[in-house]
């Protein structure tokens, strides 16, 4: 027992050091057990030394009742902790097993992620400028005189002429509708050629195809094509109205005008989607261009 007491303190510090290593590298559980063993060894060692010193001095040392009291106090402490946990759980109620938190969504950064030379930055800055000019002209900021303006003008004019048809007037400005539809269709063709034509942006900056697709996205062709399809379907309704008016049948004209509502709705949805894409693209270009200057 004397040897046990003699090696108590050094054993405690050794086990504590070993526990610290295990907690950081392999097993936190083993570290807790080693710390508890070392603490128990140190406690018993100190109690034994105190007991021997008291007995040699003719005084009473550790009595069995001391151990009983210490054990009882310890048991009471742990029982209290356990009861506290039970009460806490009862107040919270039974909750379902927790599920792992969903991983955060990965968003695509538009800041340049690779090295660009000075010439690259100048060329990419020019690309951003050309794309932004194109988008602003066609409604990227809600204005311009291109696609968005022409299509909005056609939509508004059609609403007026449809009102004339529903009022059974004998004349709807078919020529005006046809003229505005053709103007809107021409603006979509002009935009397409400006981007993808022989001397368009896509070919001029072919060396930066990845950046081009990032800025204007791969669905741009489809969006312009959707606008053209909507305009063509709308054109069929205009032709049908023209025929009804030529026959001098106001009722038929009104029916055809109302039957064109689905085509008008598709037309409006295509235009709304197109403008939202333009707004988003303008923001992407702005963010990318800012990153080039950093």
Image (cartoon, rainbow, N blue to C red):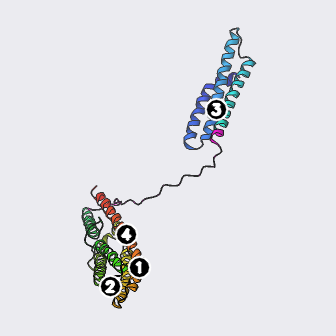
Spatial distance from mark 1 to mark 3, Cα to Cα? 85 Å
Looking at the rendered image, the disc whose residue lies closer to the viewer, 1 or 2, is 2
Viewer-proximal residue among 191 and 264: 264
Q: Position of residue 145 (x, y in %)?
A: 25, 72
Taking the image as shown, residue 209 lies to the left or right of residue 62, namely left
Distance CA(mark 2)–CA(mark 4): 33 Å
Give me the disc on residue 272.
4
For the image shown, how many numbered marks are present on the structure? 4
Marker disc for residue 111: none
In the rendered image, which residue does mark 3 sit on? 36
Residue marked by disc 2 = 170
Using the numbered discs, state the Cα–Cα distance from disc 3 to disc 2 in whole angstroms.
100 Å
Residue 9 appears left or right of 159:
right
Which residue in the protein does label 1 denote?
A: 258
Whether pointer 1 and pointer 2 mark residues with C-beta atoms closer than 8 Å, the reply is: no
What is the span of residues highlighted in magenta in the rendered image?
89-117
Name the residue at 37% across, 88% down.
249
Q: Are marks 1 and 4 in contact (CB under 8 Å)?
A: no
Q: Earlier in the sequence, mark 1 or mark 2?
A: 2
- Name the N-terminal-most of marks 1 and 4: 1
Q: Residues within 10 Å of mark 3 (few under 14, many from 20)?
A: some
Q: Earlier in the sequence, mark 4 or mark 3?
A: 3
Seen from the viewer's position, the closer of residues 30 and 244 is 244
Which image quarter: residue 68?
top right
Q: Quadrant of the C terminus?
A: bottom left
Residue 75, relative to residue 267: is it above or below? above
User: Which residue appears at 33% of the width and 64% of the height?
Assistant: 279
Q: Nearer the viewer, residue 10 or 256?
A: 256
Crowding at dot 1, Cα within 10 Å, few <14 / some 14-19 / many 20+, comes out as: some
């Amino acid at each position: 027992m004397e040897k046990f007491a003699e090696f108590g303190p050094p054993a405690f510090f050794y086990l504590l050091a070993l526990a610290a290593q295990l907690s950081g590298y392999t097993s936190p559980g083993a570290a807790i057990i080693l710390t508890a063993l070392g603490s128990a060894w140190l406690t018993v060692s100190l109690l034994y030394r105190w007991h021997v010193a008291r007995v040699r001095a003719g005084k009473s040392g550790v009595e069995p009742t001391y151990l009983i009291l210490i054990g009882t106090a310890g048991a009471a402490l742990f029982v209290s902790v356990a009861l506290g946990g039970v009460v806490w759980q009862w107040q919270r109620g039974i909750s379902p097993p927790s599920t792992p938190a969903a991983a955060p969504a990965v968003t695509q950064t538009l800041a340049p992620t690779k090295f660009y030379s000075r010439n690259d930055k100048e060329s990419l800055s020019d690309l951003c400028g050309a794309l932004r000019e194109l988008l602003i002209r066609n409604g990227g900021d809600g204005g311009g005189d291109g696609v968005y303006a022409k299509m909005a003008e056609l939509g508004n004019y059609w609403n007026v002429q449809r009102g004339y048809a529903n009022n059974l007037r004998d004349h709807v400005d078919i020529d005006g509708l046809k003229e505005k539809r053709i103007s809107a269709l021409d603006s979509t063709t002009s935009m397409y050629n400006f981007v993808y034509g022989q001397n368009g942006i896509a070919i001029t900056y072919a060396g930066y195809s990845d950046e081009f697709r990032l800025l204007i996205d791969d669905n741009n062709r489809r969006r312009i094509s959707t606008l053209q399809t909507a305009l063509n379907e709308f054109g069929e309704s205009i032709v049908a109205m023209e025929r009804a008016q030529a026959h001098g049948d106001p009722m038929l004209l009104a029916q055809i005008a109302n039957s064109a509502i689905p085509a008008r709705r598709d037309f409006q949805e295509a235009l709304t989607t197109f403008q939202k894409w333009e707004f988003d693209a303008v923001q992407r270009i702005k963010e990318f261009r800012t990153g080039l200057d950093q």
